[in-house]
Amino acid sequence: MIIGGGPGGNAAATWAARLGAEVTMIEREIVGGAAHLLDCIPSKAMIATGGAMSATKRFAGMGIEQHDVEIDVDSLADRIGGIVARMQHNTTQLLQSQGVHIVMGEASFAGPNEVVVRSSSGETRVQGDTFVVATGSRPRIPTWVTPDGERILTTRDCYPPRVFPRSIVVVGSGVTGVEFVHMFSSFGAEVTLVVSRQQVLPGKDAEAAAALEDRFLDRGIRLLKGARAQSIVREGDEVVVSCDDGRTVRATHAVLAIGSEPNVEGLDLDAAGVVLDSRGYVAIDEHCRTNVAHIYAAGDVSGKLPLSSVASMQGRKIAEHAMGQVRSDMRVLDYDKAASAIFTQPEIADVGLAEAEAFSSGRKIRVTKVPFSSTAKALIHNDPHGFVKLISDPNTGVVLGGTIVGRHAGELISVVALAVTAHLKVADILESLLVHPSLAEALTEAAE
Ligand SMILES: Cc1cc2nc3c(=O)[nH]c(=O)nc-3n(C[C@H](O)[C@H](O)[C@H](O)COP(=O)(O)OP(=O)(O)OC[C@H]3O[C@@H](n4cnc5c(N)ncnc54)[C@H](O)[C@@H]3O)c2cc1C
């Protein structure tokens, strides 16, 4: 029994079905996942359109005369709707092709082996011997603000866009916040980012964060550093964001990007005896098992890394564990080895050990950094910004991590992710015969 049809639930369902389980999935809103299909994918689609618009600036340096481009809100909205519908359809087809029984409705536990499913057509009770809670998360809304869906927005209110903000304040300078800054700025909005610390992207590579800030400042984005928003109110056609240091910002819109909360309300986990951790997420062990042996949890609700890729991997591992497929040579999921990307300009991606983390723990590392400007490909494409940073063990040469800043960083990091997962050495990257000209040559140079 899988509760939730996002990446976590889908992977658990399809893998368990392939391994011979009889699988039922219960989803209350959209097969494919609410956070996945109503937040992650639309935001990336809008960023891609914004990126295509700003690419005209790069083309101007490539011998192409620059033309003004205009955004067509209706066709952008159609495009986003089309992508979401296609992905919803693909996911449903995949589940059905594996024999997964899909039930639309809201599930809550009636006991350790039973859930009640409520939908417009009534209430049913379903029993199972193994359960996966994969109910995801939703945008966090602090007590000091009430989003109205019109001018005071959560991320989920932003697509498909009805109007493009003339000016917008983005509250929160983590991954989602900076992506929204980039997105609205690409569409021509005047953007202010409220940054509670002294640098955007807390916890990320400091040089990568600094490179992003520099680009934001070049684009005229205003950074309000060391300020915490403490109220957002509407005044006519404007919003006023007030910060704890007394500063205020006016704009036509404000968007909250201050994290997410687990979807646990209404699940009645108590009825099944499942406990939450101190932050309110479902507590799990290294096999994604809750304190109740036959109930697992995957995805955002488990409070590990809020990434689709991590949710899917947890789902797969759960299916293998629940179906008794765990062999000694299988890897336990290592969250420290998850690659992630920030879809801004420049794009930022990282995996494994970070430089700051190594320094704070006193671990000796070797860091090699190569700018993309040293590759022919970056010059050919008129985008020499960014760099590749490889982190390795100075004694063994094993690749421990890396950060990439620049075009296609999210794709290029896959090479480093593979190296980190498979304990490859710097020499393995160096010995790989990569394509020329390619941005990946910066990785070979770093390995050299
Ligand atoms: C703005 C934004 C951008 C993002 N960008 C990225 C990105 O670029 N890359 C990335 O990897 N991740 C990204 N993420 C994170 C990613 O979307 C989530 O980590 C991922 O969707 C988690 O999958 P999930 O299965 O846990 O949850 P979801 O995708 O939310 O699926 C959970 C499902 O459970 C259902 N559900 C909840 N309660 C019940 C119930 N009681 N009964 C039945 N069904 C229920 C919900 O309707 C939902 O469909 C982004 C998130 C946001 C908000």
Image: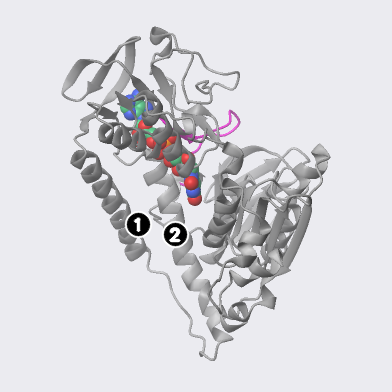
Residue 103 on the magenta segment: no
Where in the image, quadrant-wise, is ligand 1 located? top left
Which residue is tagged 1?
80
Q: Which residues are magenta?
A: 134-151
Report whether 316 appears left or right of 283: left
Q: 226 or 354: which is nearer to us?
A: 354
Mark toward the start of the polypeptide (1 vs 2): 2
Residue 268 in which image quadrant: top left
Q: 27 or 353: which is nearer to us?
A: 353
User: From the viewer's perspective, is residue 386 above or below residue 374?
Assistant: above
Residue 141 on the magenta segment: yes
Residue 128 in which image quadrant: top left
User: From the viewer's perspective, is residue 337 above or below residue 299?
Assistant: below
Report whether 326 appears left or right of 230: left
Amino acid type at image mark 1: Ile
**Residue drawn at x 30%, y 38% as measured from the top left:** 30
Question: How many residues crowd around disc 2 within 10 Å: few (fewer than 14), some, or many (20 or more)?
Answer: many
The spot of residue 381 in percent (x, y) is: 56, 80
Note whether ligand 1 is within 8 Å of mark 2: no
Q: CA distance from mark 1 to mark 2?
A: 8 Å
Amino acid type at image mark 2: Met
Q: Quadrant for the C terminus, please.
A: bottom right
**Residue drawn at x 44%, y 59% as measured from the top left:** 46
Q: Quadrant for the N terminus, please.
A: top left
The answer to whether marks 1 and 2 mark residues whose Cβ atoms lie closer than 8 Å is yes
* Display colour scheme: one colour
Which residue is tagged 2?
46
